[in-house]
Each structure stands twice: as C-alpha cells, then as structure tokens.
Amino acid sequence: MTDQSPPDRPPATLPRLGEIGLANYAPYLMNRIMGRYNASLRDEMAGLGLTTPKMRALAVLSVIEGPLIRELAVYSVVEQSTLSRALDQLGTEGLIRRETDASDSRATRVHITEAGRALFETLWPHMAETHDRMFRGIPPEERRAFVGTLQKMLANIRKHDL
C-alpha cells in the first residue's frame, strides 16, 4: 500500500455520507471535538471578558510576535471582519497594541501587551487541561501520529503559506 492519495474520482462514484456514516466522517468528528473544546472553555473565557475570537487572537499573539492582521486572521482561524472587531475590543481593553509595519505603511502588525499576556496566562491552564482531557488514554506515539496526520491534512487543504 502506498502513501499516495487516490486519484480524483467522478462525484457519482464517491460514497454518500449515509454510507460513510457520521462516526467515520473526519470533518464531522473534528467539528464535534472543536465545538466541545470551545464549549468547555466558554464559561472561563466569559469570566475573563473573552470571546472565542479574542481568546484565539491572544493565544496566537502569545506565541507569534507581531503578525500582520491578515496573518493573525489565518493563524487564529477567524474571519478578518470578526477579528477586526475583536482586536478593537482587545485594544480598548489594553490587551493588544497595533503598530504600522516598518516596510509597508498600509499594513498593521499586532502585539500582545503585558496585560494581554497575563490575561492569557490566566486562561492557559484551563486550555491545557481541556487539551489533555481530549487525549486521555491515548498513548504518546498515537498522539504524535495523530498530530502528524492533522499537519498533513492542513498542508493538503491550506490556502495560505502560514
């Protein structure tokens, strides 16, 4: 058996969702997992004045220094218009700051402030605990293989070089 993906098949020969079943359909499973992950954090985020887009932006900014807004939208998986509103709120709250890009005055870079980092660090233990719960009972080698598979899947479908 090879590692190559099967050749494209005509739509009429593809199995229907009813034949595959929801329990075997990866996008459905990924949506369920992420829906549950976000729901697990919702109360904690609300208590900190965060929404999912604001949390995602702070999470990315805690790891990546000064991305352009369009890069932040890709990394945080948030529509740019939704992200813009979240960044306005984060800026008003003193959790991020925006800077004009040194090489392109039309572009803006976003930076997390110390207050933003401190707020994110308050949420992080809950995020890490929820993450660990998802992998409970899964051996480290299986976990690494799964993450490797996700990385390959993302490379197959991504639109951006980020």
Image (tube, rainbow, N blue to C red):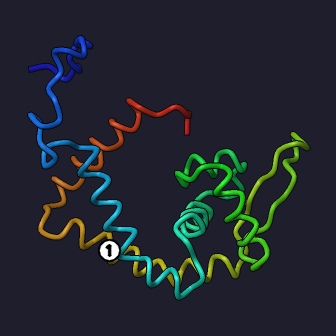
SS at mark 1? helix
Quadrant location, the C terminus: top right
The quarter of the picture where residue 135 lies is bottom left
Residue beneath the point at 63% across and 76% down:
117
- Give the residue drawn at x 65%, y 57%: 83
Mark 1 sits on what residue?
130
Residue placed most toward the observer, 81 or 131? 81
Relative image position of residue 156 (x, y in whole percent): 38, 29
Between residues 72 and 139, which one lies in front from this camera angle? 72
Q: Quadrant of residue 120?
A: bottom right
Task: Provide residue 91's location: percent of width, then percent of height.
Answer: 77, 71
- Does residue 119 lie above or below 9 as drawn? below
The amino acid type, in three-letter code, at marker 1 is: Thr
Q: Is residue 74 left or right of residue 155?
A: right
Image location of residue 123, percent across then percent down: 49, 80
Residue at 33% x, 78% y is: 129
